[in-house]
Image: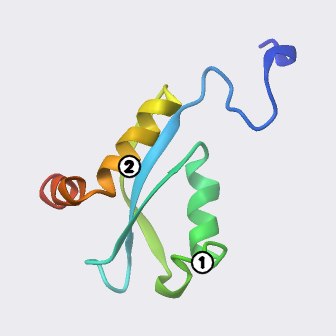
Amino acid sequence: MNFARLRLGRPALNEFYYVYILVTVNKPARHYVGRTTNLENRLKQHNYGQVPHTSKYRPWRMETVVSFRSEAKAVAFERYLKSGSGREFARRHF
């Protein structure tokens, strides 16, 4: 791999952008939609209380993960899942 071509803060070409849906273990009807390039680290952040929006509903588990090569597509899909029709889509299919 040519490390000189990598930019700090940007994923390498072989990495993915992930859109994920978390479900709280204690109240499965409560969920959270987010986006990351590192699923394991991001789930730890949610469960250690480092994300203000999810800290009071810990612990969380991954319910659904969709991977994208394109950051723009991941951003668009995350935005869709946070819309009214996207929430309904997720409720029915995930």
Viewer-side residue, 7 vs 76: 76
User: Is the N terminus in the top left, top right, bottom left or bottom right quadrant?
Assistant: top right
The residue positioned 60% from the left and 78% from the top of the image is 52
* Residue 66 in picture, x, y percent from top left: 37, 41
Label 2: few (<14), some (14–19) or many (≥20) C-alpha neighbours in 10 Å: some
Residue at image x 15%, y 52%? 93
Res 79 label: 2
Identify the residue at horizontal 22%, vertical 55% (top origin): 90
* Residue 5 shows in the view: yes
> Closer to the camera: disc 1 or disc 2?
2
Residue at the top extreme of this rendering: 2
Q: Are marks 1 and 2 in contact (CB under 8 Å)?
A: no
From the viewer's perspective, is 69 left or right of 86? right
Q: Earlier in the sequence, mark 1 or mark 2?
A: 1
Question: In the picture shown, does residue 67 fall above or below 83?
Answer: above
Cα separation between marks 1 and 2: 19 Å
- The circle drawn on residue 35 is none
For badge 2, the amino acid type reads: Arg
Task: Give x and y (percent) for residue 19.
Answer: 43, 47
Say which residue label 1 marks: 52
Out of 30 and 25, give the one closest to the viewer: 30
Does residue 85 lie above or below 22 as drawn?
Answer: above
Type of the residue with mark 1: Pro
* Residue farthest toward the right in the current orientation of the protein: 4
Query: Which residue appears at 59% of the width and 42% of the height?
Result: 37
Q: Indicate the secondary structure of the residue bearing disc 2.
A: helix
With respect to residue 69, does 85 lie above or below?
Answer: below
Give the color scheme: rainbow, by chain, secondary structure or one colour: rainbow
User: Under tag 1, what secondary structure?
Assistant: loop
Can residue 65 be seen by looking at this rendering?
A: no
Q: Quadrant of the C terminus?
A: bottom left
Residue 85 is situated, as x and y percent measured from the top left of the image, at 18, 54
